[in-house]
Image (cartoon, rainbow, N blue to C red):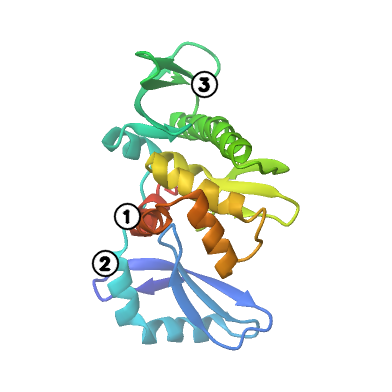
Amino acid sequence: MDFLLSSGESVAVQVQRRKGARHLRLRLDRSNQVVVSVPWCCSDHEALKFVAKQRDWLEGQLARVPAVRDLPDWLEEYPQLTGSGDRFAVRVEETERGRADYIFEENGAVIVLRVPAAIEDPDAGLMQLVRRFAKDAMACRVAYHAKRLDLKFTKLSVRDQASRWGSCSSSGGISLNWRLVLVAPELQDYVILHELAHLTEMNHSRRFWALLDQYDPSREANETALDAIASVIMRVGRG
């Protein structure tokens, strides 16, 4: 359903009904979509009345949140990707080849993302290619740190999480957000080390933080830096 702002602009509102919920809650997701969570029996009319009561908060949030960015636009402004502890300059090229791929040039300092000229959706092709690079690069980095710390994980997945940078399952599987290739090497390492620490401490207890401080002596600074850019980076590739 749609909600009319004071400016006259109409925004779409997604209603999420939850069994067992007792209260109505309003939020913006990482795609800047307006989401109202309501009890299962709540009507759309009641949900819209609740949104109207929160108009000032909602309009303030919409005015402040970073814009959603397409990946091609982001790479044009910030032509760099992180992997294996390094940051590479990026160049995007069309290729006559039938399959997208990437190669390194200039003694490994530049990564060339080659997207087929004949592809139906070049933006989607570029996204798939960057995610492939993310899986390759972070698989190497996770394996490197796990070996260095004498840790064993069961598998690695690189996904498009809505808000998390990463997670670790009780079975030892690690999942990372592909957007970690958009941040500085030390911040990517911080997330990887955070999840590796969960192989030993599946919690956020004092023991966990003490262990992570051993793995990453700059943990607090890296955590603060990552939090500062999260709202921007998490909105890349959601257009």
Q: Which residue is located at x 71 percent, y 50 percent? A: 172
Regarding mark 2 in the picture, which secondary structure is present there? helix
Q: Which residue is located at x 48 percent, y 18 percent? A: 118
Q: Residues within 10 Å of mark 3 (few under 14, many from 20)?
A: some
Q: Position of residue 44 (x, y in %)?
A: 54, 80
Q: Amino acid at mark 2?
A: Ala
Q: Earlier in the sequence, mark 3 or mark 2?
A: 2
User: What's the CA distance linking mark 2 and mark 1?
Assistant: 10 Å
Q: Are marks 2 and 1 in contact (CB under 8 Å)?
A: no
Frontmost residue, 45 versus 112? 112
Disc number at residue 100? 3
Frontmost residue, 31 versus 89? 89
In the figure, 120 relative to 134: above or below? above
Disc number at residue 121? none
Q: Amino acid at mark 3?
A: Ala
Regarding mark 3 in the picture, which secondary structure is present there? loop
In the figure, 172 relative to 131: above or below? below
User: What's the CA distance linking mark 3 and mark 2?
Assistant: 38 Å
- Find disc 1 in the rendering and name its residue: 67
Q: Position of residue 235 (x, y in %)?
A: 40, 52
Q: Position of residue 94 (x, y in %)?
A: 40, 18
Q: Amino acid at mark 1?
A: Ala
Query: Is 156 positioned to the left or the right of 179 in the image?
Result: right
Q: Which residue is located at x 59 percent, y 34 percent? A: 139
Regarding mark 1 in the picture, which secondary structure is present there? loop
Disc number at residue 63? 2
- Residue 179 visible within the image: no
